[in-house]
DNA sequence: TTATAGATTGCCT
DNA sequence: GGCAATCTATAAT
């Protein structure tokens, strides 16, 4: 049972760069409920953001930015609102959005979406056969950072450094006015360092949040 | 140059 | 619940 209303593209506005120009914790809290879109070969893919994690700068041992600026992570140190895409475990891409002003590292990791549009394309990209439209089946599409990247065909280097705040971009975050009823914060998933901090943010009760239970 | 851990997922028992 | 798949970055020889 979820409360997200249908997504209407015409009533949605582009989330501007200033939104990302602050502490990733604030961005995490406020980006929940907004809509990630991808325009691809004439089709629109869209999913509501239901789970994110904040990664900070030098003081955050779990963050890629903790090692300092490298060829891999330089986007984190650049201007806000850009895509940082990395490859993990030899299998999966993950999508982050840079936060804080140029010169300061920080980002959010998009961990789960509720599919809204382009669902046929998402099934195809994930290599799954659509049988119905049950929540349990739809969860396979975008509940998890590697899954949603595959569903949206997000890869590196093609999408790395892409500007999400540009009106020209094929990858954007839109605000359609939806606001979550309640947001919960928990420890981040899959990390061993700095694991005690509550930097994972989810829409309470949303079934598309990753993991076994919503 | 070699080893190992990693912001994950899916298949196996 | 356990573990293999399989690439990258970084640490250790």
Image (spheres, coloured by chain):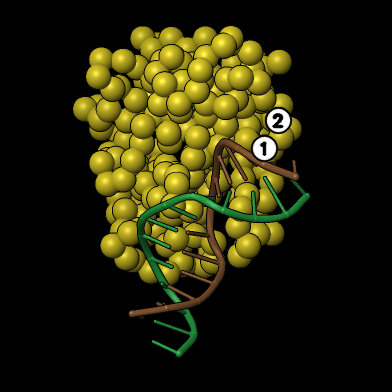
Chain colours: A yellow, B brown, C green
In the image as oriented, which residue stretches furthest toward the left? A168
Residue occupied by mark 1: A211
* Residue A59 percent across, percent down from the top left: 52, 67
Q: Residue at x 36, y 32 (%)?
A: A153
- The quadrant of the picture occupied by the N terminus of chain A is top right
Q: Quadrant of residue A162?
A: top left
Which quadrant is home to the C terminus of chain A? Answer: top right
User: Crowdedness of circle 2 by 10 Å Cα count: few (<14), some, many (20+)?
Assistant: few
Kindly tell me whether residue A135 is visible in this rendering: yes
Does dot 2 land on a helix, a strand or a loop?
A: loop
Residue positioned 52% across, 26% down in the render: A141
User: Of the residues tagged 2 and 1, which is closer to the observer?
Assistant: 1
Q: Which mark is residue A136?
A: none
Residue beneath disc 2 = A214
Q: Which is nearer the eye, A209 or A201?
A: A209
Circles 2 and 1 on the same chain: yes
How far across and down, in percent of the image, does residue A20 sit? 40, 42
C-alpha span from label 2 to label 1 = 7 Å
Residue A183 location, x and y as percent? 66, 33
Q: Position of residue A198 (x, y in %)?
A: 66, 51
Q: Residues within 10 Å of mark 1 (few under 14, many from 20)?
A: few
Image mark 1: chain: A
- Helix or strand or loop: what does disc 1 sit on? loop
The answer to whether mark 2 and mark 1 are in CB contact below 8 A is: yes
Chain letter of mark 2 equals A
For the point 66% across and 21% down, the residue is A136
């Amino acid at each position: 049972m979820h409360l997200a209303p249908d997504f209407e593209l015409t009533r949605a506005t582009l989330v501007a760069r200033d939104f990302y120009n602050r502490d990733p914790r604030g961005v995490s809290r406020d980006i929940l409920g907004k809509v990630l879109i991808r325009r691809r070969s004439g089709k629109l893919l869209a999913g509501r953001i239901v789970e994110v994690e904040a990664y900070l700068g030098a003081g955050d041992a779990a963050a890629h930015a903790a090692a300092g600026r490298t060829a891999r992570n330089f986007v984190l140190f650049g201007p806000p609102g850009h895509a940082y895409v990395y490859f993990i475990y030899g299998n999966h891409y993950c999508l982050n959005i840079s936060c804080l002003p140029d010169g300061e590292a920080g980002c959010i990791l998009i961990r789960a979406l509720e599919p809204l549009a382009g669902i046929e394309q998402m099934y195809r990209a994930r290599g799954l056969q659509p049988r119905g439209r049950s929540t349990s089946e739809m969860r396979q599409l975008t509940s998890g950072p590697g899954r949603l990247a595959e569903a949206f065909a997000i890869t590196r280097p093609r999408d790395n450094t892409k500007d999400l705040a540009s009106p020209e971009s094929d990858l954007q975050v839109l605000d359609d006015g939806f606001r979550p009823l309640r947001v919960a914060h928990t420890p981040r998933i899959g990390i061993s360092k700095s694991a005690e901090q509550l930097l994972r943010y989810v829409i309470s009760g949303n079934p598309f949040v990753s993991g076994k239970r919503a």
